[in-house]
Amino acid sequence: MTPTRRARSLADRVTALLPNRADLADVRRDPRRDLLAGLTVAVVALPLALGFGVSSGLGAEAGLATAVVAGALAAVFGGSNLQVSGPTGAMTVVLVPIAARYGPGGVLTVGLVAGLILVALAVARAGKYMSYVPAPVVEGFTLGIAGVIALQQVPNALGVAKPEGDRVLVVARRAVEEFLRAPNWTAVALAAGVAVLMLVGTRLRPTVPFSLVAVLAATLVAQLAHLDAATPIGELPSGLPAPSLGFLDLGALGTLLPSALAVAALAALESLLSASVADGMTVGRRHDPDRELFGQGLANIAAPLFGGVPATGAIARTAVNVRTGAGSRLAALTHAAVLAVIVFAAAPLVSKIPLAALAGVLLATAIRMVEVGSLRAMARATRSDALILVLTAVATLALDLVHAVLIGLAVAGLLALRAIAGQARLDEVPLDRGDHSAEEHALLAEHIVAYRIDGPLFFAAAHRFLLELAEVADVRVVVLRMSRVTTMDATGALVLKDAVEKLGRRGITVLASGIRPAHRRVLESVGALPLLLGDGHEYATTPEAIAAARAHLEHTGVLPGPRAAAVGEGTAR
């Protein structure tokens, strides 16, 4: 391809990722319903944005900036009409160790680089590959994330300063020890009250935004009762900061790149998972995975410029958006606009919210993330699914989310290979009597054996196949029926070659039938094809190969030829 054609192809790909007329038509269809849905989502998103900002280590203002900037850009450029983006618990889990090691500047740099990676993935049309992540891995890291989010809230829920450390289990244990030395029952009561009100209220009245109700109630109680032990969020800026690249540390880009790759992978996975959930909650809606990556990429490039943390599509807020009747991107855009108004107009009020109340919101969110029915179904499906789920969840708690997903994918891949390898079979095929007499058929069966190879012949199954084929009884010709081989790699072809050579050293000729064109190329590349064509011919069917095997045995004198058979019959007369 010439440079001009490459540039034109790249331009076409980018153009396909931009908003189009269909998006505008959707916005015009029912704007009133979208505006109402966006307002509802903003009410739900406010305490979550504040809480996740605090949990990330960059403060509540970072969570609000992310919800506004990333929420607006992802709404306009994303691949789902119903997706709502912003700070999420899963991303917070990844950001905490980055903030502890590199500080706020490191988190912002990682977010910007991750955004660039997402845009590159979108241009490369990599969105479709995210669907290959197994469901047990997704369920496992969701369960693990819920546990990590809950553990992250322990210091604020107990009203103690966050201990040093980047491992949530260690930090939570130290926070409990600090609490036992100087109990703060006011913070515990506020956190527990908010969590219980959210969980019970949502069950009784799902349409009411109990997260905001609970936070407002906790804030009023703390202010009216002058609860000094209820530490507030603290002063927030009245508006978004001016965009700046001053946080970038170009010298640290090399060390931050692995973290950026992890953030980009998580943003892609969670956003596409959330968009798929939105598709499943509607009829006839399908998101564009590449456009979704593009929108999330732009959102994560812009959010750090305003002090925001990396963002993803948010499953909980997206679900609320769908349930309240959203039909276009206008709803998610409205959600971002409402939060922007709150940032500019209500910052003094927001700053009085107790940290314990936000901890209660996130504790309730963590509990609601655990779908008991889904986990039970996954655990009962197969032992492999249960093992993958548990390993991923435990690794999320003990290590981090990125390693947990890698471990889950590795174990899932190994178990899948084991299952596929188990499908490969070598079955003996009875010889067709055709027009042979019983005596002739018995004679052929003494010297010719036919096998059918079913399933994949690749590295995971090849050595077992070699053992089975090498143990063939003492016959003169082996016919391999290969039309049912589903896939073959170089290892499988080499093992087959080794088996044929071993049989050849025992004086056994091997003929093959039904070799597929794709498999023929693999066999030829490793030098196995000539060995399977003992007489230089290729046979389309097994009967043709068996006929050739008989001719070979007649030629070598193992079986009587047609002339010898005729003489024998004349003598008998």
Image (cartoon, rainbow, N blue to C red):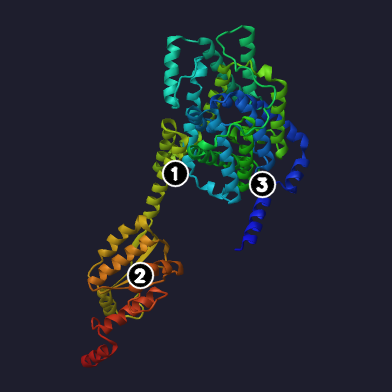
Is the residue marked by circle 1 packed among few (<14), some (14-19), or many (20+) residues within 10 Å? many
Q: Nearer the viewer, mark 2 or mark 3?
A: 2
Q: Are marks 1 and 2 in contact (CB under 8 Å)?
A: no
- 26 or 446: nearer the eye? 26
Q: Is residue 427 visible?
A: no
User: Cα distance, mark 3 to mark 1?
Assistant: 31 Å
Of callouts 3 and 1, which one flags the residue occurring earlier in the amino acid sequence? 3
Is the residue marked by circle 3 packed among few (<14), some (14-19), or many (20+) residues within 10 Å? few
Amino acid under label 1? Leu
Q: Which residue is mark 3?
A: 284
Of callouts 1 and 2, which one flags the residue occurring earlier in the amino acid sequence? 1
Q: Which residue is mark 1?
A: 409
Amino acid under label 3? Gly
Q: Is residue 297 left or right of residue 510?
A: right
- Residue at image point 56% right, 50% down: 126
Query: Considering only vertical position in the picture, is 513 above or below 252?
Result: below
User: Cα distance, mark 1 to mark 2?
Assistant: 35 Å
Is the residue marked by circle 2 packed among few (<14), some (14-19), or many (20+) residues within 10 Å? some
